Amino acid sequence: MEGIGVVRAIDPAAGRITISYEPIEHLNWPSGTMPFRVGKTALLEGMTVGTKVRFRLESQEITDLKPF
């Protein structure tokens, strides 16, 4: 599933990123803010709070993350 949102917090040590995301129709999720695990901490490199991103979720884990 793909989503679009804004980075609110980054925790590389825990392998997590908090994103305020737009509604994700495939999951029936309204817009919200939530911390997500990342599959690889390398996905967090270069990310900063406030960056708009496009992300891919698999089993509630981010497997792809890019500035949007």
Image: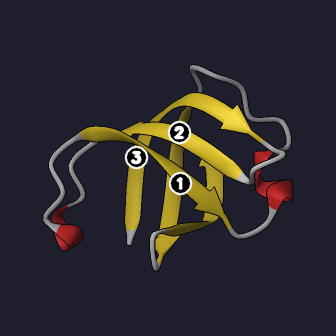
**Circles 3 and 1: CB atoms closer than 8 Å:** no
Q: Which residue is mark 3?
A: 4
| Secondary structure state at the residue bearing disc 2 | strand
Q: Which x, y percent locates residue 31?
A: 21, 41
Q: Is residue 59 above or below residue 27?
A: below
Q: Which x, y percent locates residue 2?
A: 40, 64
Residue, far top: 50
The amino acid beneath tag 1 is Phe
> Image quadrant for the N terminus?
bottom left
The amino acid beneath tag 3 is Ile
Q: Is residue 32 above or below residue 63?
A: above
Mark closer to the observer (3, 1): 1
| Secondary structure state at the residue bearing disc 3 | strand
The amino acid beneath tag 2 is Thr
Q: Which x, y percent locates residue 23?
A: 21, 49
**Circles 2 and 1: CB atoms closer than 8 Å:** yes
Q: Which residue is mark 1?
A: 36
| Secondary structure state at the residue bearing disc 1 | strand
Q: Quadrant of residue 49?
A: top right
Q: Which x, y percent locates residue 41?
A: 82, 57
Q: Earlier in the sequence, mark 2 or mark 3?
A: 3
Q: Is residue 67 visible?
A: no
Answer left or right for 43 relative to 18: right
Picture disc at residue 18: 2
Q: What distance separates the C-alpha of mark 3 from that of mark 1?
A: 13 Å
Residue drawn at x 20%, y 72% as measured from the top left? 26
Residue drawn at x 57%, y 20% as measured from the top left? 50
